[in-house]
Amino acid sequence: SWNIQIIDQNASGVGYGFCPISLDSDDNPCIVYSGHPSVRYASWNGSNWNIQKIAYGSAHDLVLDTNDNPHITFGHLAYACWNGTWWDIQTVSTDYTVYSALALDSYGNPHVAYITGDELKYGSSNGSSWTIQTVTVDKNLPDINPWLSLELDSNNIPHLMYYTESSYVDQTIGGARSVNIKLAVLSNSHWNIEPVLSSLNFSNFGNMVLDSNDNPHFICTQSHYLSAENPMLLSTIFYISWDGSTWNIQTVASNSTSSNIGFLTLGPDDRPHILHFADGIIYTRLTGTTWQNYTVDIKSDRLCQLAIDSNGNPHLSYLLSLIHISEPTRPY
């Protein structure tokens, strides 16, 4: 069974309902989300939730540093970090965006990625000021890309995974949407951008993470229509990983009826843990060579996120009102 806690009955779906979760060094969950009307940060101390109101705006992303202090992006576009006494809030850019991805380097400095109009941008801070650069200009960038992914490798080199939109011919009903997944890596002040498995007609991109060897892992979908008479859209969810020389593809789920792809993270042993949707939230993890599925909640197919504690147990956050879920501790 799952332990379900309601954190805040005044949470808001403004800003598309992003509510990222991170675990501190004691495996306590911490979540940032949108309230009425301020961004809020909730942290569990082992017995109750402490909720802080940060500033006006909608939540984007959350990362904890090595001292368990939270770092947050929100609004259009701001960054906030807790220094132990108060929230230090900085304006990152006046560019309009609805989502930004956040990462911290080994010195604790923040890095962000976001889309504004036809531009994919990357920003970094030296602790006192922000430097913003354009990664690429592409009219096919999506207006909303909640799983634009930014990861820093062991050498603090940024890796960005994102998608552009296109179309293809579906044999059942004709035209259909597809996405071109791309990986951008900064090298010698130049962004190397490569398409990923461009011969495949992916219909959606989830998110990307780096493993302990700096290899990227991500999830995506391929969709098809049931028939011309019954144009129900069905999706196959793939988990794809790079082993240093090739992309390895595994099928996580077939014939999913949800258009919401879910979320990927890796456990302490680099094994994948995935959220996806089939008449509700499904948690899936790879045990040996077998994907094991667990139904979490049949009432939601909203955006949700996942974190894995030091024992390999999953913790989820999503919005109904905002709910945090943790599985009872057990051997993994």
Image (cartoon, rainbow, N blue to C red):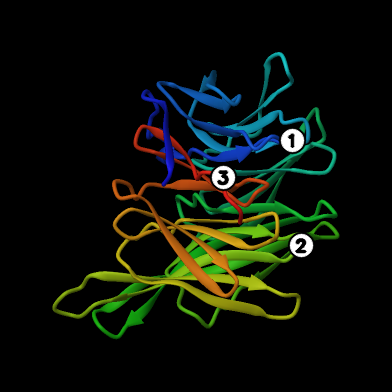
Q: Can you give x and y, in whole percent of width and height, for residue 159 in the image?
A: 71, 58
Q: Can you give x and y, in whole percent of width and height, for residue 33 in the image?
A: 49, 31
The residue most toward the left is 229
Q: Secondary structure at mark 3?
A: loop
Taking the image as shown, residue 222 lies to the left or right of residue 40, namely left
The residue that mark 1 highlights is: 65
Residue at position x 40%, y 27% in the image:
11
Q: Which mark is residue 214?
A: 2
C-alpha separation, residue under disc 2 versus residue under disc 3: 29 Å
The residue that mark 3 highlights is: 329
> Quadrant location of residue 241?
bottom right
Taking the image as shown, residue 103 lies to the left or right of residue 226, namely right
Q: Can you give x and y, in whole percent of width and height, for residue 196 in the image?
A: 60, 73
Q: Which mark is residue 194?
A: none
What type is the residue that disc 3 sits on?
Answer: Thr
Taking the image as shown, residue 18 lies to the left or right of residue 66, namely left
What type is the residue that disc 1 sits on?
Answer: Asp
The residue most toward the top is 85
> Quadrant location of residue 66?
top right
Between tags 2 and 3, which lies in front?
3
What type is the residue that disc 2 sits on?
Answer: Asp
Residue at position x 51%, y 49% in the image:
117
Q: Within 10 Å of the Cα at label 3, are there few (<14), some (14-19), or many (20+) other Cα atoms?
A: few
Between tags 3 and 1, which lies in front?
3
